[in-house]
Amino acid sequence: MYVACDASQLEWRGALELSKEWVGINEIKNKDDVHSLNQVAFNLPSRLISKIYLFRTIFRGSGWGFANDPDFMHVSDSPEYWDEVGTKFYKKYHNLDKQHQVWKDLVISGQPIVGPLGREWKISFDGLKIPWTVFTNYPVQGTCADIMVLVRVIFRKRLRKESWGDKIKLVTSVHDSVVVDCPTEYVDKVVRLFYDVFAALIPNIKTIWGYDWETPLECECKIGVNMKDMKKIVPIDKTS
């Protein structure tokens, strides 16, 4: 049986953390349905469009880009329409907008962007076109990659301490997902272990990097006989 552990909304949470965007952070802490809220706030036609839009606009897509994107052009093929949505988005999440402007100034001045966990990104600027989608992407993706490295390390260390740990095989790790091959009788133990790993992430970030991470980090687990046919599962003690 495959067990896949996915970090919940990792890119969005990473972007919120890097910008200390408290509107978004508090939405997560309050367990709000962010996509439904934004559907109303940005006058979008469905929760699904709102969800896709959020994960695309983290990296500062242009109105023209959305107007010519097959996922969005059926809503509107007007760049002005999507620019207006973007204005509403960054008005709501204003600290994220401020952080993007800070990164822009660093890139234009030839300075590196330095992340809170020690990574640096030196992004070239040709003096003509500001590479918005590049410098808004690298710090988020790089920081989130460090988080997932920590997930794998903690999970592996804790797995080795279990008497049944040698029966679990790490299969792959892609972006925000870790997949293991697990005998059926150990599925709940592995899922419980993944949840415990994520519960321990923020204290471990403080211990390793000396950084006070404030955005909740959570996971979802799925199981299946292959990677195509999987269903969500939670530990037994979380089902009540």
Image: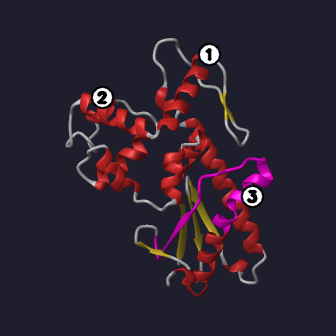
Q: How much space separates mark 2 and mark 1, taking CA atoms? A: 27 Å
Nearer to us in this view, 16 or 155: 16
The residue segment tinted magenta is 197-226
Q: Is residue 68 something one can see in this rendering?
A: no
Mark 1 and mark 3 lie on one chain; the one further toward the N terminus is 1
In front: label 3 or label 2: 3
Q: How much space separates mark 3 and mark 2, taking CA atoms? A: 42 Å
Residue drawn at x 46%, y 40% as measured from the top left: 93
Residue at the disc numbered 1: 109
Relative to 80, say whether 186 is above or below.
Answer: below
Residue drawn at x 54%, y 80% as measured from the top left: 238
Relative to 181, say whether 186 is above or below.
Answer: below
In the image, is residue 167 part of the stretch drawn in magenta?
A: no
Residue at the disc numbered 3: 204
Q: Is residue 194 something one can see in this rendering?
A: yes
Nearer to us in this view, 174 or 96: 96
Residue type, mark 3 in image: Asn
Mark 3 and mark 2 lie on one chain; the one further toward the N terminus is 2
Q: Is residue 198 left or right of residue 24?
A: right
Nearer to us in this view, 74 or 224: 74
Q: Position of residue 74 (x, y in %)?
A: 19, 43
Relative to 65, say whether 15 is above or below.
Answer: below
Relative to 150, say whether 92 is above or below.
Answer: above
To which quarter of the image does residue 184 belong? Answer: bottom right
Q: Secondary structure under badge 1? A: loop
Q: Position of residue 77 (x, y in %)?
A: 21, 34
Q: Secondary structure under badge 3? A: helix
Classed neighbour count for the residue bearing mark 1: other residues with Cα under 10 Å, few (<14), some (14–19), many (≥20)? few
Residue at the disc numbered 2: 64
Classed neighbour count for the residue bearing mark 2: other residues with Cα under 10 Å, few (<14), some (14–19), many (≥20)? some
